[in-house]
Amino acid sequence: MIKSTGKKLFDAFNYTFMIVFCMLIVLPFMHIISISLSSKEALIKMSVSFWPKGWEFSAYKAILSDNVFLWSVVNTIYITIVVTILNLIIDVMAAYAFSKKFYGKAFFNYYFVLTMYFSGGLIPFYILMTNYLHLQNTYLSLILPALVNVFYIIVIRTQIESIPTSLVEAAIIDGATQSQVLFRIVVPSIVPTIAAIGMFIALGSWNSWFNVMLFINNNKMWTLQYYLRKLVMEKMITASLSEAGQRIMELGTVEITPENYQMAAIILVALPIVCIYPFVQKYFVKGILVGSVKE
């Protein structure tokens, strides 16, 4: 009886905690949507609201009609796909090589781990990319630095080493080459791990903006995250005061507030991730649990 009462109290506390936790995540997102869709007159009166007042879509229309935004969408999708595919191929092949015994393995393993803690510094990296490789204002300057991830190589190598050795040896005895063993036996055995890592790589590439700031001067080569930071800051600074004392922006014949514009841009940049996440969340969970469960 005491045990049953304790379990009910624990469940009640657990559900209460989860509801409060979910509200802390959902309510700020609803507030962002509310601001992006509210009219500038409604924004003057309301302080915090989770439902739009006035229903004004001008900010979304202004952003979607901006050619730079459309170019940034195309650029981000292109870079994300290329980086994810190439990064996975390189990481899997490197992990497979490191799972084998070869001369100097300990040295190369130590060097690989060292690069996780010491990347060489920002200035040498910038000089290398611009003065020696001449990659400024090229897509390669955004793709090349993101092609290898040592941490993911170590994770994949751990998964490869968990595959029974007898399975690989049997394939080699039957005449399979190393590439056939890799792509026909090893890769199909670790698909959940590869899928989870692919999701993390794609998410990181989608949200990257720092290298764009360093190497790209052409606004038609911006990514979404850099577009968001650049445009919002410019619009916030150039906004003027209305008669009511509220900052406004003039986009053609339409007047909106910088807050409308900023929140609408945040929603548009985050929308693809929010739409895709329900379909790939199982891979995120598997990625978090990789190596934590022993059978």
Image (cartoon, rainbow, N blue to C red):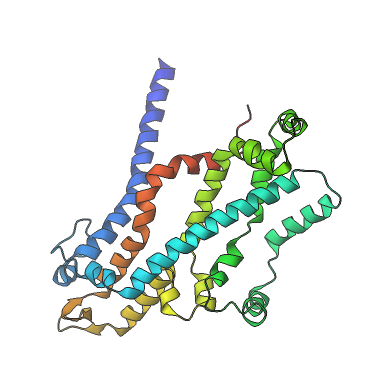
Front in this rendered view, residue 74 or 36 = 74
Q: Which residue is found at the position 26% from the left and 59% from the top?
A: 33
Residue 133 placed where, x, y %?
65, 77
Residue 291 occupies quadrant: top right
Number of residue marks: 0
Determine if residue 207 is in view. Answer: no
Q: Residue at x 34, y 57 (%)?
A: 271
User: In the image, 199: left or right of 67?
Assistant: right
At x 64% / y 48%, what residue is drawn?
Answer: 92
Q: Is residue 85 above or below residue 132?
A: above
The residue sitting at the right extreme is 103
Measured as percent of width and height from the top left, residue 122 is found at 63, 74
Q: Position of residue 34 (x, y in %)?
A: 23, 60
> Does the image show residue 19?
yes
In this picture, residue 192 sits left or right of residue 67 = right
Residue 260 appears in which quarter of the rendering?
Answer: bottom left
- Left or right: 95 as drawn, with respect to 243: right
| Quadrant holding the C terminus | top right
The relative height of residue 11 versus residue 91 in the rendered view (above or below) is above
Q: Residue at x 61, y 52 (%)?
A: 89
Q: Nearer the viewer, residue 134 or 59?
A: 134
Q: Quadrant of the N terminus?
A: top left
